[in-house]
Amino acid sequence: MLHEFITPKLDVDTRWNSTWIMLDSLLRMKLPLNELLRRIELKEPPYTGFTFRPGDSLIKEITKESWAAANTLYTFLEPIKEATDMLSASTYPTFGILLLTNHVIKFHAVETIEKSQDEHTKSLLTQLKGSWMTTHQNWTRGRHELQLF
């Protein structure tokens, strides 16, 4: 059986959807990573001697909580990645589509935060939601308000 070769992707500050792409590659590497960590922990050949100093372990277990948090963030960011792709310049989005997309993302953020069980993830998602709420308010009120003649 042939296995897909998965390469880790890195987050890029200037690309909105790169965090989702990074998490996608990480989550697809979950089983191989867990197996590698298991073999290193059990010191199976050729995975012996992975230390910096005697007594130090190079490898740490990735906890179930960490995988769950990564998965929650991945799920949270997926519609945002799709919206970013949809609103790219090549599709010539209109302001109406932008407002509708922003509304859908805001609804998704509220729903995801309410379902989240992990406090750290809930805190992060709440901060992201606050940022989008401020952006939405700036677009729909005040000096950015559209005037009809």
Image (spheres, rainbow, N blue to C red):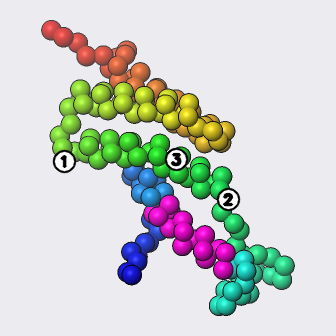
Q: Sequence-wise, which precedes: disc 2 or disc 3?
A: 2
The residue tagged 1 is 90
Q: Sequence-wise, which precedes: disc 1 or disc 3?
A: 3
Compared with residue 147, is residue 116 higher up or lower down, i.e. above or below?
A: below
Farthest bottom residue?
46
Question: Foreground mark, 2 or 3?
Answer: 2
Mark pair 2, 3: CA separation:
16 Å
> Which mark, by number, is residue 63?
2
Prevailing SS of the magenta stretch: helix
Where does the image place residue 107, in percent across and percent down from the top left?
Answer: 42, 28
The residue tagged 3 is 73
Badge 2 marks a residue whose secondary structure is loop
In the image, 51: left or right of 33?
right
Using the image as rendered, state which of residue 124 and residue 4 is in the foreground.
4
Report whether residue 127 is seen. no
The magenta span reads: 25-39
Q: Dot 1: within a 10 Å radius of its alpha carbon, few (fewer than 14), some, or many (20 or more) residues?
A: few
